[in-house]
Amino acid sequence: MLPPESSPNQAAPAPVPEMSRRSFLRSSAVLASGLAALAASLSPLRELGDYVSLERFMQKYYKELTPEDMAKVLKRIELEVERQYGIRPHVRDLKPMDGVEFVYALNLTRCIGCRKCVHACVAENNQSRNPEIQYIRVLRMPHGSLDIEKATHDYAPESVPEKGYFYMPVQCQQCRNPPCVKVCPVHATWQETDGITVIDYDWCIGCRYCEAACPYWARHFNFTQPSIPKDRLNPEMAYLGNRPRRQGVMEKCHFCIQRTRAGRYPACLEVCPAGARKFGNILDPASEVAYILRTKRVFIQLKEELGTSPRFFYYFDV
Amino acid sequence: MRRATRNYLVFLRRCALIAFVGDKRYYLWMGVLTVFCLLGLNAYAKQLVHGLITTGMSDEVSWGVYIANFTFLVGVAAAAVMMVIPVYIYDNEELHDLVIFGELLAVAAILMCLAFVTVDLGRPDRFWHLIPGLGQLNFPASMLSWDVIVLNGYLLLNVHICGYLLYCRYRDRKPSKWFYIPFVFVAIGWAVSIHTVTAFLYVGLGGRPFWNSSIVGPRFLASAFTAGPALIILALQIIRRVTEYRITNKALLTLRSIVQVSMLINVFLLVNEVFKEFYSGNLHVASSKYLYLGLHGYHALVPWIWTAIVFNVVAMVLLVLPLSRSLKWLNLTCVLCIVGIWIEKGMGLVIPGFIPTPLGAMAEYRPSLNETLICLGIWAFGLLCYTVFLRMAVPILQGRLSQANEGAPAAGLGEAATNPALEA
């Protein structure tokens, strides 16, 4: 059927034992060295460590978790965080409130480009410090132009503001037509009823299609295991918000879901020394954001022509 | 029923075993490929542990050579159909048996495509989230979910067509038309769809003006139907040289005319795109400027894209001239087509779409060594698969591996080893 040297299994009944013993030895040697080479090439996997556990591998999609499942998962996350950081966090699954749709308004006349919001956000939301992930990018723009291609990202003067420039912080615009949600192949990111686009960090497969789709460069990828100094961890956490992420998943601004769904302001707003940031429920006519959008003659949705319809508005004191 | 299963298992077993038999050149070729596969596997193990930080990608340029190679190879897979159309629609006899070689190339290319998207995933352990029923496939909204379906569907179609035809030949039976002709016609439409859907992955992104252009789809098809058959022309000559399988020059020249027309269309579409970008001079020209001329002192892609353009234009001229009827010139032309289109579609399409970023920042991308090793590993894996497929298919088509000689000692398999090295 086949030349005997090709099949170690047929060594015994083969007609010339001398030949087949030699070929058996040869086949075994080839097989053994092949397996050794395979094992050697896979050896880096020994450092895989905590990459995945059976529980995490089997974990269901956020929207399919029953309240009991969720309680178990939250408990597990608390234990995992405690093991890693030595602090027992408080992880909650906060749901959107009825009759609430969050909107952000940012006063371009007031922003002085100090980047305090950027760093307050990193501290609040447990972003990786090394490599550092930031949800807010402050653009320095020359007077008179909204052309983003003229923006400077890495400005570093002695003091801000600088003459001849204005500053435009950009973060997730919480679009009504979010391109990132549309392109996600596994529904790992979606828009909640209060207008916040969230990510299930345990469901994301890390294809980065949403990152390519986002016109605001708002989505960021964990290119390696995030690292946060133990004493910097914010223990007040939400499942869809600032709980620590793992290597290989996306993350982005979620309007500080762990704060705003509990009746507080986002961290970037609280820290702003210029009072440039306003946040609230657009469905409540008495809210500050409703007042601003009602009374300002001009406000801007960034890249309005793309039809993404952001819930983030830029306005001016005119 | 049981007998049929047994027959089929014997067939599979003989096919599997023959892949381990060959002459010295065959072992050498397979050995080299295996070494590259293992190096790639080792690099991938490192990437799994440390994350995609081991690549040259960043939040600025978040797709790189993995997706570039993926895009190119989807084109190669789609182009296999360009051999099927003349055979089944125009009854071109010259190419009849060669269709199998084209479709096997498609199978190998799709396997490489699947490998390239897998290594690009941040969480490959969660692949099952993509499986309909088990996971949460976002169909039909996400173009990536379309790609998952059409690529796997195309793989199954081609495996079925090749497998069925080869098994019939092995048993010396006439293939029943009902079992494959409908699939062949579905596969023709499907081939166009896999590359269109892959183009739509990019075209559908409104925030990336460089990709958000309706010409990307047609250009994808034109370039695929250039590079794919060019690759097949080279592969067929290698098959002809290392096996006793007869392939006529006429068949190669039929493929040449496909490459010829496709390359003319490809260059024409390129001219259209460049004109629209630069003549109107609107703000969205930044990515094209970066690609062709360099922007704000960043110009890593400029030498690449001009190499691609020169290769493509020279190839086009050669293809139009009767000179390329001689195999020597035709081979040179094919190499130029393949390299030119690989650059144009990989580096030239994927990377500049990210530069500058949507917020106007400049960044550049250079694949890392680890990333390059993974790519080489996947190419080696694809070539390994294609070699094995041919090692099985050639003796079957020649009638040397058939049911008739089951049990016979090695029916002349030893002396005629295949070595379809795709030197391209």
Image (spheres, rainbow, N blue to C red):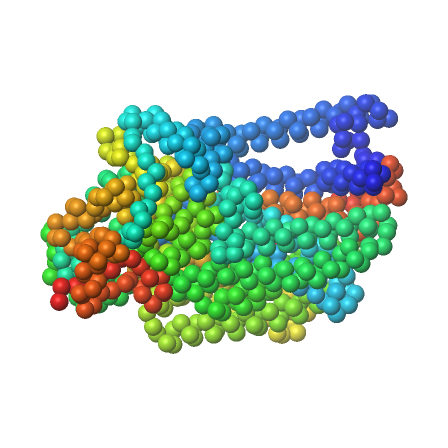
Left or right of residue B301: residue B218 = right
Q: How many marks?
A: 0
Left or right of residue B319: residue B95 = right
Left or right of residue B174: residue B303 = left
Vertical side of A236 occupied by B158: above or below: below
Vertical side of A205 occupied by B302: above or below: below
Please state the horizontal and vertical placement of residue B388, each as a whole percent of the image: 69, 44
Please state, as top left, top right, bottom left or bottom right, where the C terminus of chain B lies in the image: bottom right
Question: What residue do we see at 32% from left, 51% from top?
Answer: A194
Question: What residue do we see at 49% from left, 56% from top?
Answer: B141
Q: Is residue B37 visible?
A: yes
Q: Is residue A23 visible?
A: no
Q: Nearer the viewer, residue B209 or B372?
A: B209
Please state the horizontal and vertical placement of residue B23, each as a whole percent of the image: 74, 41
Question: Which picture quadrant has residue B384?
Answer: top right
Please state the horizontal and vertical placement of residue A169, each as a whole percent of the image: 23, 55
Please state, as top left, top right, bottom left or bottom right, where the N terminus of chain B lies in the image: top right
Question: What residue do we see at 47% from left, 27% from top?
Answer: A46
Q: Nearer the viewer, residue A203 or B158?
A: A203
Please state the horizontal and vertical placement of residue B10, each as a whole percent of the image: 80, 38
Question: What residue do we see at 75% from left, 45% from top?
Answer: B392
Left or right of residue B39: residue A216 = left
